[in-house]
């Protein structure tokens, strides 16, 4: 197993439960990939994912090992899921409570309540087909795509998320509220297929949760399950090449020269990196450099982790701060690749739920700004600090008074760090952009098209990014990886 993100850890557990002896190789000094943890000056910061949706996908992994997830990880439901704040100070508490949501919609536009309910009914149907029926199904042939084409058309897959929302809701702020979800998986609401409208119902049905102690607790729990099956996990193990003989993966070679033979190889590395850097050109047919470079990558992420020596009790656990522009800002990020002067932000205050993540009387924060990926040409070594300072001034003026005199620890991550640390093509935060022409069969397949016995999991393969997506990519392996006894 190359990489120890959630997709890789989940795949290792599923393969271990099927009788494989699994070795997980992680090039960094800790497990988790994008879900690693930063510990600094007494604060604990989740580096990546901060919310858990569809928790049954995690519970399945514990059940495969004869264990209960609740014995190792305590999930707390978020109420509300998010607080959305507009530039004028108006807020919308987004939750799974149907009555409360109708009331919130009515506060913004009474006339849009029926349209909101129609949209949620649509989201329920899209979720039933797109997630519950197809999320763990491999798309290994064109026939698989043709089989679902009628459903895609019926469910409006040819439209964008924003376009589908706009069919039901007229108020522009409500259109923003119900169309922003693709940004959580690296997509533009104006380009991502309406299939991703399923997220609204997915959140309502299974809730939005936080893992006490931080998302790193989930990483630790999954690692324990792997060890319990006799698997091994190695950090500081940097894979240089996937060995291929007669068109079949035969193991890996580390940068140290160590050769590790294997019956199958599973890559949880960035899919573009897997094909461009880990496989010799002679075995690559579909995923050539030309094809990869022509693909659309998801946006980049700028993340500022900071701790304060005071608490902000009125700030919610999850806050989404909308800037003055929506469509135009998205166009700057995804189309023009321009680092704009304004921004929309996701602010995470985990100490609202778990005060133990900071010293007593302190608060921990993580603020994320979607930005262009490295195709924009920004020199983040020069622009990171000015950009962070602009965000800090904005937060101080809008939500965190006195912030400039309260920060006691600080760390930033830029798209360049994603490229350097996670080997992410173009420094993108989520792999391929989730547009219709890069979904399902059009994504790199879970069973490699180019090399037998090579399999892919994670955000860069089917079904895509986000915790439900990467965990589902591991479920797909149950259908495409042969039983261990084949190699006995």
Image (cartoon, grey):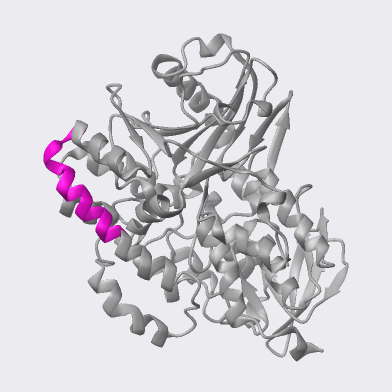
- Up-down: is 304 above or below 235? above
Q: Is residue 459 visible?
A: no
Viewer-closest of 456 and 482: 482
The quadrant of the image that shows the C terminus is bottom right
Viewer-closest of 305 and 389: 305
Q: Position of residue 168 (x, y in %)?
A: 17, 52
| Location of residue 393 by image quarter | top left
401 horizontally vs 119: left or right: right
Query: Main SS type for the magenta part?
Result: helix
Query: What's the residue at 46%, 53% (across, down)?
Result: 206
Magenta stretch contains residue 120: yes
Magenta stretch contains residue 315: no
| Location of residue 439 by image quarter | bottom left
Q: Which residues make up the magenta segment?
A: 108-123
| Location of residue 194 by image quarter | bottom left
Query: What's the residue at 68%, 32% (across, down)?
Result: 44
Q: Is residue 48 visible?
A: yes
- Up-down: is 253 above or below 447? above
319 horizontally vs 404: left or right: left
Instruction: Return the residue found at the far left.
Output: 111
Q: Position of residue 256 (x, y in %)?
A: 87, 61
205 horizontally vs 38: left or right: left
Query: What's the residue at 42%, 19% (across, down)?
Result: 399
The quadrant of the image that shows the N terminus is bottom right
Q: Position of residue 311 (x, y in %)?
A: 56, 16
Q: Position of residue 238 (x, y in %)?
A: 78, 59
- Up-down: is 310 above or below 163? above
Q: How many numbered tags mark residues here?
A: 0
């Amino acid at each position: 197993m190359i990489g120890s993100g959630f997709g890789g850890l989940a795949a290792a557990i599923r393969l271990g439960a099927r009788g494989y002896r699994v070795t997980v190789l992680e090039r960094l000094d800790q497990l988790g990939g994008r879900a690693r943890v930063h510990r600094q000056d007494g604060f604990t910061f989740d580096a990546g994912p901060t919310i858990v949706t569809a928790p049954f996908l995690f519970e399945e992994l514990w059940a495969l090992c004869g264990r209960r997830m609740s014995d190792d990880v305590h999930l707390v439901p978020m109420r509300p899921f998010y607080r959305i704040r507009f530039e004028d100070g108006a807020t919308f508490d987004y939750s799974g409570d149907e009555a409360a949501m109708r009331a919130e919609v009515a506060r913004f536009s009474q006339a849009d309540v029926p349209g909101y309910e129609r949209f949620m009914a649509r989201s329920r149907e899209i979720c039933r087909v797109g997630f519950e029926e197809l999320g763990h199904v491999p798309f290994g042939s064109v026939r698989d795509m043709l089989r679902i084409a009628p459903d895609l058309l019926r469910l409006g897959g040819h439209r964008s998320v924003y376009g589908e929302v706009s069919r039901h809701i007229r108020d522009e702020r409500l259109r923003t509220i119900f169309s922003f979800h693709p940004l959580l998986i690296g997509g533009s609401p104006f380009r991502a297929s309406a299939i991703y409208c399923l997220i609204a119902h997915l959140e309502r049905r299974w809730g939005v949760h936080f893992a006490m102690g931080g998302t790193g607790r989930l990483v630790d729990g999954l690692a324990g399950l792997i060890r319990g099956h006799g698997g091994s996990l190695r950090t500081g193990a940097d894979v240089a090449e996937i060995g291929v003989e007669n068109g079949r993966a035969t193991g890996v070679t580390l940068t140290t020269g160590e050769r590790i033979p294997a019956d199958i190889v599973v890559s949880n590395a960035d899919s573009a990196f897997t094909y461009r850097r880990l496989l010799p050109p002679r075995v690559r047919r579909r995923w050539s450099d030309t094809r990869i470079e022509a693909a659309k990558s998801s946006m980049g992420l700028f993340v500022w982790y900071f701790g304060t020596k005071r608490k902000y009790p009125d700030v919610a656990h999850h806050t989404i701060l909308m800037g003055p522009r929506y469509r135009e800002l998205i166009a700057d990020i995804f189309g023009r690749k321009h680092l704009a002067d304004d921004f929309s932000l996701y602010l995470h205050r985990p100490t609202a739920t778990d005060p133990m993540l900071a010293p007593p009387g302190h608060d921990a924060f993580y603020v994320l700004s979607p930005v262009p990926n490295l195709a924009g040409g920004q020199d983040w070594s020069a622009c990171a600090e000015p950009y962070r300072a602009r965000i800090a001034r904005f937060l101080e003026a809008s939500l965190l008074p006195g912030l400039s005199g309260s920060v006691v620890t600080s760390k930033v991550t830029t798209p360049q760090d994603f490229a350097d640390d996670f080997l992410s093509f173009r420094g993108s935060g989520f792999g391929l952009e989730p547009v219709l022409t890069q979904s399902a069969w059009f994504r790199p397949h879970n069973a490699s098209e180019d090399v037998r016995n090579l399999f892919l999991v994670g955000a860069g393969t089917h079904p895509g990014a986000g915790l439900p997506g990467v965990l589902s990519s591991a479920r797909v392996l149950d259908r495409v990886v042969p039983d261990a006894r084949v190699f006995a």
